[in-house]
Image: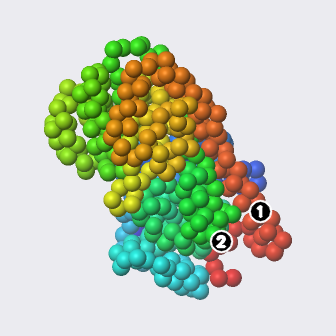
Amino acid sequence: MRQRQQSIVAWRRRVNPHAPSKNNEAPPIAYFMNLFPNLTETFVYREVDAVRRLGRRVVTFSIRRPGGREVSPEARHHIDSTFYFLPVGCLELLMTHLAVAAAAPIRYVSTFAAVVGGTHVTLRDRLRTLCHFAEAVSVVPTIRALGVRHIHAHFAVGSATCAWVVARFLDISFSVTAHAYDIWQDRLLLPEKLDAADFTVTCTQYSQHYLQQLRPAAAPKIATIYHGVELKRFAPAERPDGAGLRILSVGRLVDQKGFATLLRACALLVAGGRDVRCEIVGDGPLRQALEADVAALGLHERVRFAGWVFQDAMPDLYRTADVFALACQRAPDGDMDGIPNVIWEAMASGVPVVSTRLSGIPEAVENGVCGLLVQPQDTEALAAALGRLHDDAVLRHRLGAAARQRVAGWASVDDSARRLLERIDALVAARAAQSQLNGLPHLMAGSDT
């Protein structure tokens, strides 16, 4: 326990080397994540960086620490400044719970009942929530000591549960960004979190409308803020018109990405006499099956699996591609994408996108304007769309230029972070004003008084 306390002190020195005056600087915002930083969730740490560029202090908390292969070199600095819930010793966990419960017994019991006693589909889910409750209580003293007034959680699963618990104990506000699998597949206490959160944002209007229908009483608190991209990083480049079509696709090798459909479409293009090369960036459980598909379709010389590629190498891949293709579909377990961030990156790079009419994708890719859309799992239509771009370089250039213009207009990461921060600041200010009217301390100490 003593070693853990020493590590907390060292961490606080790293994230706050010069303690700000509470009189002239806004209180820090805490970000809660499940795994941070994460190679497949780059939009999270880019948002954190953007909020910091806006002059706000952010303290990041993550339930788990990523392994070395899960972190891009550009994001490794986040590890030193992030507080990790786990591992935590059993004795320390017990002592913290006893202290928190002794200070606020009624709040402890009511929070436990609200969270662990909430709606769960399976016993496993209830046990997961029990673990999240235990983990959340362990950081209550740290959040209090930092003077945090608001917690923002990414993904409406464990991280959001922890944010809810800590916010209840300290009587501070919290918000959630709901993404994809946490809406469509792993809905851990999702209705209760929509009710409890001071506001919820999603990355697509499609998801926003679904959540508002799921919980009509919470509908006014649910809004859309698109994931932004760094426009300077993903800049367009001149692409020489060659004889063939260079197709780029990026994503985890899982069902909802539709890579099997893309491979079959490539086979149709080759059979029709078109010269195509397809590079697939990413890895996942379907790698072996997809490699078998390549062999069966005779695409050995046409398709390359690049595996995971760190973010610093991605801009060059977009610049050398003629088209970006992602055949998104709904997986058998119900999971599906919102707007994959790689679509925004490709568009920012001036690359025309070929994708599907699924979920929020049509919100980003306007068919015939900045890309081409087909129905999910329609191999022939996907091949036809790619074939059009193979045959018409003028169309490729026009769609690519419009794609860049679309992203620059309303999907930059700084603009997205500013919209989120405006909501947080308005909420914190309103709560502070209400507390002053009620004659209450600005930040509750986590007691029942």
Give neighbour class at mark 2: few <14, some 14-19, many 20+ (Cα, 10 Å): few
Q: Quadrant of the C terminus?
A: bottom right
State the residue position of label 1.
430
Kind of residue sitting beneath label 2: Ala
- Considering only vertical position in the picture, is 346 above or below 274? below
Q: Is residue 37 left or right of residue 177?
A: left
Q: Nearer the viewer, mark 2 or mark 1?
A: 2
Residue under pointer 2: 217
Residue at 60%, 33% in the rendered image: 406
Tell me residue 410's x, y (percent): 63, 38
Residue 209: name its quadrant.
Answer: bottom right
Percent position (x, y) of residue 388?
41, 26
Residue in front for this viewpoint, 384 or 298: 384
Give SS at disc 2: helix
At which x and y percent is residue 446?
62, 75
Q: What residue is drawn where x is 56% and y is 50%?
A: 204
Q: Quadrant of residue 303?
A: top left
Question: In the image, is residue 110 above or below residue 348?
Answer: below
The three-letter code of the residue at mark 1 reads Ala
In this view, 59 is above or below 215: above
